[in-house]
Amino acid sequence: MAKRELDNSPEAKAARVRTSRRSKRKGNAFELLCAHKIVDAAGTPFEKKDCYRTPQSGGHRFAGVNDLQISDHLLAIFPFGGEMKHRKSFRIEQMFDPTQEIGEYHNQVLAALERAPRPNIHPLLVVRGNGGLIYCASYRDALNQYWDTLPATPGFVYRHGRALWKMVLFDNLLNALRAKAETARQVGILQAA
């Protein structure tokens, strides 16, 4: 098979730049969507300042370690930090035989949490393909501890490295957050910061 030549014409370079910018905008919009969904699920007294997109996704030294910055107040009921990945295509079946790229996503989430100054924060990988459902994955045991109904929640368990992970619909995790926040409000634990 002959080696493919890269077209270096000005038109081809401009097309590559446009595609790259579109991809970046799509990823940024997905991170923002996830942040808004988390704040909406947590309800009052949480605001946008409690969960927001990291500018340039950690691309500079002042940024946080994850794609989303979550306040200590929100971390008390949502102990996850992670990476949001919007792919051109994603099907849950890809997790049965993960590609190198999927493995790198897991490694990126784990490396970010190692740099995190906060203890007891669990990794969270949120993935969606164009127009598809949003899935999230974390350590199976962390999700089991987070909410009681997880064993009955549709999803599947897989291994990355030596750890068992579980992938579920992101909306299921948000429903658990909604329930935790409501319980905390009822017992008076959750008050305005």
Image: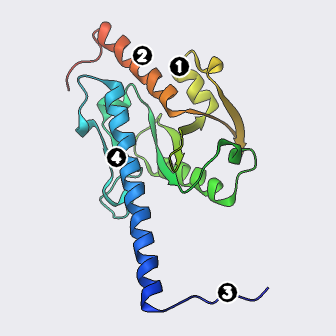
Answer whether labels 3 and 1 touch (C-beta < 8 Å): no
Q: In this view, does 102 lie to the left or right of 3?
A: left
Question: x, y (%) of residue 178?
Answer: 39, 20
Q: Is mark 1 on a helix, strand or loop?
A: loop
Which residue carries the number 4 mark?
A: 32
Quarter of the image that includes the N terminus: bottom right
Which comes sooner in the sequence, label 4 or label 3? Answer: 3
Which residue carries the number 2 mark?
A: 179
Answer whether labels 4 and 1 touch (C-beta < 8 Å): no
| Residue at the image point whose x is 44% and y is 27% from the top | 174
Kindly identify the amino acid type of the residue bearing the numbered disc 1.
Answer: Trp
| Residue at the image point whose x is 32% and y is 56% from the top | 63
> For the residues marked 4 and 1, what is the alpha-carbon distance in whole angstroms?
25 Å
Question: x, y (%) of residue 45?
Answer: 23, 24
Farthest right residue in view: 1
| Residue at the image point whose x is 49% and y is 52% from the top | 86
Which residue carries the number 3 mark?
A: 4
Kindly identify the amino acid type of the residue bearing the numbered disc 4.
Answer: Leu
Which residue carries the number 1 mark?
A: 147
> For the residues marked 3 and 1, what is the alpha-carbon distance in whole angstroms?
51 Å
> For the residues marked 3 and 2, what is the alpha-carbon distance in whole angstroms?
54 Å
Which comes sooner in the sequence, label 3 or label 2? Answer: 3
Answer whether labels 4 and 3 touch (C-beta < 8 Å): no
Answer whether labels 2 and 1 touch (C-beta < 8 Å): yes
Question: x, y (%) of residue 183?
Answer: 37, 11
Which comes sooner in the sequence, label 4 or label 2? Answer: 4
- State which mark lies toward you, 3 or 2: 3
